[in-house]
Image (cartoon, grey):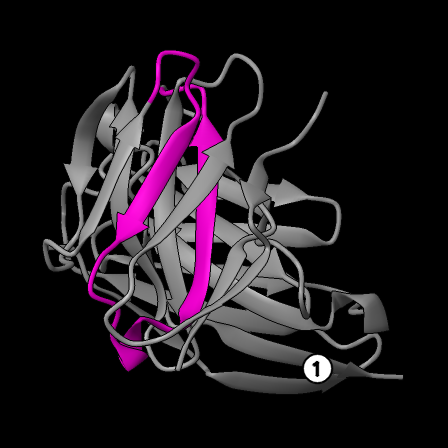
Amino acid sequence: KAGVTQTPRYLIKTRGQQVTLSCSPISGHRSVSWYQQTPGQGLQFLFEYFSETQRNKGNFPGRFSGRQFSNSRSEMNVSTLELGDSALYLCASTTGGAGELFFGEGSRLTVL
Amino acid sequence: GENVEQHPSTLSVQEGDSAVIKCTYSDSASNYFPWYKQELGKRPQLIIDIRSNVGEKKDQRIAVTLNKTAKHFSLHITETQPEDSAVYFCAASTGGTSYGKLTFGQGTILTVHP
């Protein structure tokens, strides 16, 4: 059974640009969550999608957005990038009920 | 919203010793408490979890205890080994439709010296 797959694994952008990250969940998992990991702030919840609907949202500005497709794959977008957006973005999937979150390897974003 | 405090931030032990990491949470509605281990450059992986209707859970060398009244839960690792060296995160969730929304503690860097 394939795990959670995130692409791209590494990317470098400049301030003001936008970026789109992709996440393919484990087959059968309908819930996809996104987290930002930084040395200073730790792991912070961005948002969760379940059956193509945003089910929960964290405390991030509107520049951070996401969506989920009918096949449960999810994308997150960050517009007008700032230096502080440099982080490891982790995607996690679960069945949607009471269960373990399975994380992907993450997409490491560097903003110059 | 929920806030999770985790202590200590770093922990250094000798191989064979025990290690204890403690977390407190603020939202009394939280009912699911997982612990994740993240090795350097790798993804976080669940090592054990506990739900609010249980006070203690054990899996080989790892145990978790929960005190709902005091709103704190702890991870206990016995007979530590060098491969236990990693960052450990506690987390809390209110469950229901929010299992995907975890509030994490700041993490504990555990170093086990051979």
Residue A26 lies, in percent from the top left, at 57, 24
Please state if A13 lies on the left or on the right of A76 as rendered.
Answer: right
Dot 1: element:
strand
Q: Which residue is mark 1?
A: B111
Q: Is residue A89 visible?
A: yes
The residue nearer to you, when weighing A59 against A75, is: A75
Name which quarter of the figure residue B31 lies in: top left
B60 with respect to B47 (left or right): right
Q: Is residue B75 within the magenta segment? A: no
Left or right of B76 on screen, residue A73: left
Identify the subunit bearing mark 1: B
As rendered, which of B10 and A67 lies closer to the eye? A67
Residue A70 belongs to magenta span:
yes
Residue A102 pos. (x, y %): 54, 37
Residue at 22% x, 38% y is B94
Image: A102 above or below B69: above
Inspect the image, locate mark 1, and give the three-letter code of the amino acid beneath it: Thr
Residue at position x 36%, y 60% from top? A36
Quarter occupied by the C terminus of chain B: bottom right
Q: Which residues are magenta?
A: A69-96
Residue drawn at x 52%, y 56% is A107
Residue occupying image coordinates x 14% and y 47%? B28
